[in-house]
Amino acid sequence: MFDLITSKDSNVKNDVLSGITVALALVPEAVAFAFVAGVEPMIGLYAAFMMGLITSAIGGRPGMISGATGAMAVVMVALVAQHGVQYLFAAVILAGLLQIMCGIFKLGKFIRLVPYPVMLGFVNGLAIVIFLAQLGQFKVTNAAGELQWMEGTLLYWMLGLVALTMAIIYLLPKLTKAVPASLVAIVTVTALVHGLDLEARTVIDFVRDLLPADQRDAATLAGELPSFAIPMVPFTWETVMIVLPTSVILCLVGLIESLLTLSLIDEMTDTRGRGNKECVGQGVANTVNGFFGGMGGCAMIGQSMININSGGRGRLSGITAALVLLGFILFAAPLIEMIPLAALVGVMFVVVIATFEWASFRIVRGVNKEDAFVLFLVTGVTVIADLAIAVVVGVIVSALVFAWKHARHIEAKSHIDNDGWKVYELDGPLFFGSVSHFKDLFDIANDPNDIVIDFKDSRIWDSSGIDALDTLADKYEEQGKKLHIRHISDECRSLLRKADKFVEINVVEDPRYRVATDKLA
């Protein structure tokens, strides 16, 4: 695997050069996702600029790059097709407000509950999605106006230039790390293509292929500053109902992808991002997008990997990428239009190799089959459907697997104490999955008149456990016997609703388990 970490210390030079590299890679992605959503290319470029600038300035993860993404573009298609782009802007504003609320109420902390196999599946799935997205660059428009795979000399030059780009990125760091290898590769390949007049498709060729035939000759990436405008939609409850479903999905997809990318960068850089602050940053950026004619977005794992690989660690790297992108739009569109697609594809192929968790193949052989199943499930759903569905499915399946595995992990040892009472010492959690086995642990008919359940090594986790305890007490009461409970924690005691009728409590302090806290969030 290529080394993603070229420097542990953030500095101005690394951040600026890395930001320039990221800006070059942002252009085709933003344009492509704009076409996916059914909007004009400039709307995607505006989104990349505003998302990158705002999240880098106020977000919770320095070094992470945000922009227009495919995961959110897919969600926008139906709304744009049915109601137009103005409704999209309204939906993006509402989605941004929802994301801000998630940050205010500190919901970002719950990303820590995503299991490790789900995280691996997310990373591998996105790597595959990024790879498949690059294959579209190997298609050209034929005489009939249809896209077809490259052939002949054009294909050979494309493959050769991609290989050259990847070779430079891999070999240059062995000689020097003074400049980002990705930036050197892009500049070198661009110079070769235009200096030797090689047959190679450029960024503007890619844009023209996506446009109708009558618009191709006038295609350009030149633009002007985005301007403030309130979306031109009726301010009615009906409008809210139209955009709300799309806004909720955009909110969830954006936060899930952003927070999982944040966690990945945390692990790579041995630092800690702030999830709740990132929620607010994403929300502010999307809200601004809606008022300034952008399609919104979220964190981009591919561009974030380019940034980290190029040495970008601070907020300046993302801010530089956004400002350089704006500079291209305003003043230097011809320069960005002449970049060969092969150079950008080569950079993204390196990102794919670096992003894919190759160790997961070894992990699969070493872990239990349930975790392996979750890993492959999340990877597959990410590729076939989308990220949000994949993560939700993965978390649900992991929870069900956990419940199933622990359903029979409750056991009891019994003995008769000096007072003639029978003591059941429980070991394991009492919850909905273990209730059935819990009931089979007791010999109601043959037990003495006083029975003790010792919870020193057990806990009651939910209402199903409470109901099982109540039912057991009722059965003993029907036999004229009395049930006592000892060594129950304060937390479990607070759950009991009929404790005063059948429980004798002797509380001892139990360890406190922290699932998710707000610290550093």
Image (cartoon, rainbow, N blue to C red):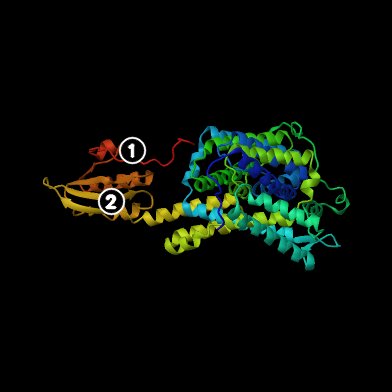
**How many numbered discs?**
2
Q: Determine the residue positioned at 49% across, 59% down.
A: 359
**Quick check: 141 left or right of 414?**
right
Of the numbered discs 1 and 2, the one sitting upstream in the chain is 2
Residue extending farthest to the front is 175
Residue 142 sits above or below residue 230 on the image: below
Quadrant including the N terminus? bottom right
10 Å crowding of disc 2: few (<14), some (14-19), many (20+): some
Q: Distance between the residues labelled 1 and 2?
A: 17 Å
Instruction: Report x, y in % for residue 376.
Output: 52, 60
Type of amino acid under label 1: Glu
- In this orientation, does residue 102 appear? no
Q: Residues within 10 Å of mark 1 (few under 14, many from 20)?
A: few
Q: Nearer the viewer, residue 174 or 419?
A: 174
Q: As rendered, which of 177 and 222 lies closer to the eye?
A: 177
Residue 260 image offset from top left, x and y in percent: 54, 46
**Which residue is nearer to you in this view: 500 or 183?**
183
Frontmost residue, 264 versus 458: 264
Q: Which label belongs to residue 491?
A: 1
Residue bearing the label numbered 2: 427
Vertical placement of residue 300 versus 367, above or below:
above
View extreme (left): residue: 418
> Does residue 156 appear in this view?
yes
Q: In this view, does 264 lie to the left or right of 404?
A: right
Could you say where residue 161 lies in the image, as x and y percent from the top left? 72, 60
Residue closest to the far bottom: 152
- Residue 138 sits in quarter: bottom right
